[in-house]
Amino acid sequence: MDAPGFTASLVAGGVAGVSVDLILFPLDTIKTRLQSPQGFNKAGGFRGIYAGVPSAAVGSFPNAAAFFLTYEYVKSLLHTDSTSHFKPVKHMLAASTGEVIPFSLVQFPLWESLKALWAWRRGHVVDSWQSAVCGAFAGGFAAAVTTPLDVAKTRIMLAKAGSSTAVGNVLSAMHGVWRSQGLAGLFAGVLPRMAAISMGGFIFLGAYDQARSLLLEVGRKSP
């Protein structure tokens, strides 16, 4: 990766992270309360859903910048031609080195694949808004299939100290939810999660592509 690409990925990633946190933090708070074993109202309902937004936005800049810098760097190391069947694996590896969670392993290969398909159908590289649409679809799908893991994580975070759930075993937490609430419990909050992450994917990945394109263009015009 050359110097302009390094700078563009770093800054664009930070801008994307701040943008999505400022807009979607309240929805994530609502989703967490919907998944709480106490119930939505006892967990806080709609009260204070904007609490913590500034600190989250400040923290998201370096995190998102580091993620996208790593993602683009690993993609450049694993460069393959456009027809290679290895491309989805490359995107999974790049996403996993930036942030090791199942969500990224689903979202980023799907985002890249949708962009490639759209570009092939249109005959040119996708625009930033098209990348954003692909990000929304990829984010929504990834959100749906990883909801049980998110429910388990929420239950572990909210568990009473000393309880079996508080130990942190994700599979055990999922099994407990399945026994007590069945499939509905495992997918509690799936619709607001999908809505929030679809919007987040649109903003996050669209803002990243737009900011990176602008920064690279500025870099090319600079002497």
Image (tube, rainbow, N blue to C red):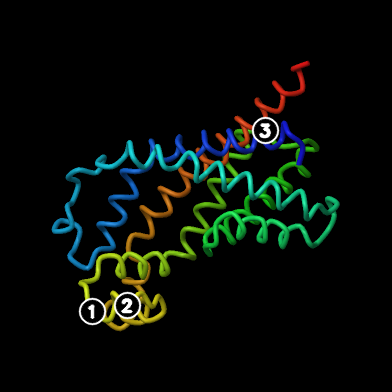
Amino acid marked by disc 3: Asp
The numbered disc on residue 127 is 3
> Which image quarter: residue 123?
top right
Q: Is residue 217 above or below residue 122?
A: above
> Which image quarter: residue 3?
top right
- Of badges 1 and 3, nearer the viewer stands 1
Q: Earlier in the sequence, mark 3 or mark 2?
A: 3
SS at circle 1: loop
Q: In this view, does 65 lie above or below 75?
A: above
Provide residue 2's location: percent of width, then percent of height. 77, 37
Q: In this view, does 20 lie above or below 75?
A: above
Amino acid marked by disc 1: Ser
The numbered disc on residue 167 is 2
Q: In this view, does 12 lie to the left or right of 196?
A: right
What separation in Å lies between label 2 and label 1 (alpha carbons)?
7 Å
Provide residue 4's location: percent of width, then percent of height. 72, 31
Amino acid marked by disc 2: Val
Looking at the rendered image, the quarter that the N terminus falls into is top right
What separation in Å lies between label 3 and label 2 (alpha carbons)?
46 Å
Dot 2 crowding, Cα within 10 Å, few <14, some 14–19, many 20+: some
User: Residue placed at 61% from the left, 31% from the top?
Assistant: 210
- Quickly name the residue at label 1: 163
Q: Of residues 222 and 91, which is closer to you in this image?
A: 222
User: Residue placed at 33% from the left, 60% from the top?
Assistant: 189
Q: Of residues 51 and 125, which is closer to you in this image?
A: 51
* Pointer 2 with pointer 1, Cβ within 8 A: yes
